[in-house]
Image: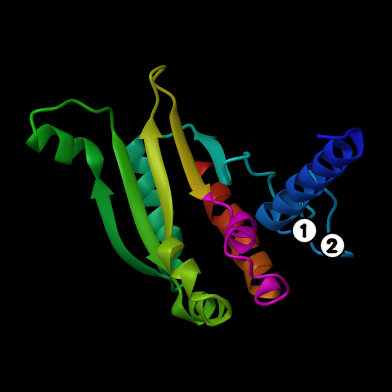
Amino acid sequence: MSKLVRKQILGLSGVIVILTMVSVIGLQPGRFSVGEAAPTLPIPMPTGLVIKQSPHSVAETESRFVRILEEKGLNVFATVDHAQNAEGAGLVLPPTRVVIFGNPKLGTPLMQCSQSIAIDLPQKLLIWEDNAGQVQIAYNDPRYLGGRHRLGDCGNDVIQQIAGALDSFSNQAVMP
């Protein structure tokens, strides 16, 4: 293989990596640069998760979060208690719960943009006690999901609205 062909392959590989990053991150011209989040919103982990610590127990954090959702008029569909399910199977798991919630007025427009986002809706909040006994919460960053499902400009305002609401709700749930 000639040097020119190798350079062309390497150049093409670089372009593919950059395009993949832009696609996954969901960057849009005139929006935010790589690694920069919307003002005041937390920067998600590379996995697309926003993780925060809670000074409360898992049960108290869940109760506070559900109360906030209900006060805001969101639907709380279910809570999955993974520790209880593990116990039923004869296994041990520290307290681990997932609250499943949403608002069809916001989720439906996103599914109209790309039905594949339905795999990530309704939203979920994970609440767990880690090995050090610290309670953590995590949720999928809507901006990451927008990139994952290649929404582009479609639904961007809704994504930003959901991201801001999740940040606010989760902050309220973990306040001392």
Q: Are marks 2 and 1 in contact (CB under 8 Å)?
A: yes
Few, some or many residues within 10 Å of mark 1 (<14, 14–19, 20+): many
Residue 28: % across, % down: 80, 64
Q: Quadrant of residue 104?
A: bottom left
Q: Residue drawn at (77%, 55%), measured in percent from left and top?
A: 38
Mark 2: amino acid? Arg
Using the rendered image of the protein, determine whether residue 86 is visible from the camera's viewpoint.
yes
Residue 94 x %, y %: 28, 27
* Residue with the mark numbered 2: 31
Q: Nearer the viewer, mark 2 or mark 1?
A: 1
The part of the chain drawn in magenta is 140-156
Q: Nearer the viewer, residue 34 or 2?
A: 2
**Alpha-carbon neighbours of circle 2 within 10 Å: few (<14), some, or many (≥20)?**
few
Q: Is residue 52 above or below residue 75?
A: above
Please state the horizontal and vertical placement of residue 125, each as a whole percent of the image. 43, 50
Identify the image's colour scheme: rainbow, by chain, secondary structure or one colour: rainbow
